[in-house]
């Protein structure tokens, strides 16, 4: 089958029309007709080869919503015609300790959808059945794509850190990931604090479910909530005043980062010890947790706040993202 | 009542005989006749005013085993004649969120036994009934003292980190605290790795329950167990190559420090995120957990490896500790 896609031909290149042949379908693989594909900052990082792992031509796109149009002979769980989502991962080994333990997202031999293979800025995409997550009835497919990458990235920490509805929680950075975290945590029942450096976003942030917006550029503002929070989720990838954030944590509070800041985080042992605090991190989430998350989203009508572009305007969409103008997640729609 | 004690009169001073008057017993207080008192590195830090919180004359000693000889009118749980232990803390407020939540060791208004009050290098010591931990029948009182500070400090992380008998675990630094951690973890059922820089200790470390001793000065040795451990407990207070230790952790592994290294720990976010790892810390443990720990110790015959000095040779004992010669914990005995 020929796939019509948009690809970067080299680092920092514009996306150009690109056609490739999918080849023979493996027994455990499915082909998905792409309806929608979210645009994630990682697409930009991959186009630019920021992580040194990009291969060109590179077809970005890993927040995919579509329909199963072909299934290999050994495919389980999904069938022709099923509506599914496909996120950052497209395959796992299915047999290692992590996969067998239900933690496929930690499999050392995972295939990422756009690393060494082609993603969802296209009319079709291929993946292993395990990562083709069935969409629950009633889901809004036009907004579901970003849940499969950005969404699960901020949902998983809530589970891992055992956040409870009675907790006071904070989210650092209210962008593509952070705004979804606010919505999840509001519906989790928590008292939600948003740390933002952008006063222009305040009204929208409150509307999305935050109870308070804290100016993250003000050390006084941080001090005013010392000892209050049980959980903080960092979604930014810039160096922060980590000790100040740790100080806003209550005893046994947890700081969790999904933002991959490059510089090591200087964490004071005294602060951890004195308050039984911890610092953790995580990537994405398992297929099982993706299913659970989507059910939770449908039950509570949780979706990213999106801006829709037609797929053929993919370069305009990328420029909009790169300029920091996305409010809050871009979704590309195939016609 | 007059108390005969040993006190430092100023920073880094030798300990000298010192008598003080205990004053009126408060309604919630108990007086304890000291049978034994362990010697902790924190006693040395307090004598030397390393933390800037010492008040002189300073009577060290916070690993106390003895007998209740006086009880205030509102004392609960312990009675005259009961054998009890008293550790780093001598009193909590009993009403804050932490105390009411069973986490008295995190009470912001805790009284530490040797901070602004006098400790157990003495014939008597006073404390709040809540921190006078009843000793279970059959306990070896001559060795139980160090469990109340060093012991609970390494026992609490095992509980907090939810270490399981099926886990592979590591202990960094096999001294006063680390050797007790080895014994706990062996009896927890774990596969135990000891990280030590001192080859002279190897035979003793294996005897105490470690399955393998890893040379902590060798980066090759650390690399040889990459991805293996579920839990690492750091008991040292020196800067370490944290990322190398994080790399020895399996996915979802936890690094926990009770060693209060002064320099911030440079923790790479990528390592935390990629493997869902975390870094935490904790101080001591609650009265309830002290009781649980002592029961566990009696059931499994777990005690620190001790060297006994008579109380009047307290200066010799401190010199032995300061010279790094203690194998592995010193206990002072009152005659």
Image (tube, coloured by chain):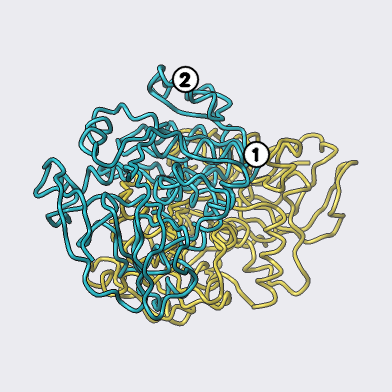
Chain colours: A yellow, B cyan
Mark 2 neighbour class, 10 Å CA radius: few under 14, some 14 to 19, many 20 or more: some
x and y, in percent, of residue A10 in the image: 48, 35
Pick the front one: A76 or B289: B289
Side (left or right) of B257 relative to B262:
right
- Secondary structure of the residue carrying numbered label 2: helix
For the C terminus of chain B, the quadrant is top left
Residue at x 49% of width, y 62% of height: A177
**CA gap, disc 2 to disc 1?**
21 Å
Side (left or right) of A302 relative to A281:
right
x and y, in percent, of residue A295 in the image: 71, 69
Can see residue B84?
Answer: yes
**Pointer 2: what residue?**
B202
Mark 1 neighbour class, 10 Å CA radius: few under 14, some 14 to 19, many 20 or more: some
Residue at x 61% of width, y 62% of height: A147
x and y, in percent, of residue A129 in the image: 78, 47
Residue B225 occupies quadrant: top right
Q: Is residue A52 above or below residue A12?
A: above
Residue B3 occupies quadrant: bottom left
Residue at x 48% of width, y 72% of height: B101
For the N terminus of chain B, the quadrant is bottom left
> What numbered label is drawn on residue A307?
none
Residue reaching furthest to the left: B10
Chain letter of the residue carrying label 1: B
> What numbered label is drawn on residue B189?
1
Chain letter of the residue carrying label 2: B
Pick the front one: B308 or A76: B308
Q: Earlier in the sequence, mark 2 or mark 1?
A: 1
């Amino acid at each position: 089958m020929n796939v019509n896609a948009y690809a970067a031909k080299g680092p920092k290149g514009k996306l150009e029309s690109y056609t490739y042949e999918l080849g023979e379908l493996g027994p455990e693989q499915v082909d998905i007709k792409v309806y929608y594909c979210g645009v994630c900052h990682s697409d930009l990082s991959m186009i630019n080869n920021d992580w040194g792992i990009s291969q060109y031509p590179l077809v970005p796109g890993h927040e995919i919503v579509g329909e199963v149009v072909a299934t290999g002979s050994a495919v389980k769980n999904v069938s022709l015609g099923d509506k599914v989502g496909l996120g950052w991962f497209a395959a796992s080994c299915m047999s290692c300790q992590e996969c067998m333990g239900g933690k496929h997202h930690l499999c050392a031999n995972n295939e990422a959808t756009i690393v060494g293979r082609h993603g969802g800025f296209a009319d079709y995409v291929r993946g292993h059945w395990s990562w083709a997550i069935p969409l629950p009835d009633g889901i809004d497919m036009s907004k579901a794509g970003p849940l499969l990458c950005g969404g699960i990235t901020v949902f998983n920490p809530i589970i891992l850190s055992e956040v409870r509805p009675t907790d006071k929680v904070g989210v650092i950075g209210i962008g593509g990931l952070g705004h979804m975290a606010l919505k999840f945590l509001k519906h989790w029942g928590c008292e939600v604090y948003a740390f933002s450096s952008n006063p222009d976003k305040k009204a929208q942030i409150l509307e999305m479910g935050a109870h308070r917006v804290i100016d993250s550029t003000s050390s006084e503002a941080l001090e005013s909530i010392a000892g209050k929070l049980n959980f903080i989720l960092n979604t930014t990838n810039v160096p922060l005043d980590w000790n100040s954030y740790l100080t806003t944590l209550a005893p046994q509070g947890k700081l969790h980062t999904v933002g991959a800041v490059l510089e090591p985080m200087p964490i004071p042992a005294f602060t951890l010890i004195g308050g039984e605090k911890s610092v953790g991190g995580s990537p994405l989430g398992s297929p099982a947790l993706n299913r659970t998350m989507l059910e939770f989203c449908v039950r509570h009508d949780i979706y990213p706040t999106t801006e829709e572009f037609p797929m053929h305007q993919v370069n305009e969409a990328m420029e909009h993202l790169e300029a920091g103008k996305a409010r809050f997640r871009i979704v590309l729609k195939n016609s």
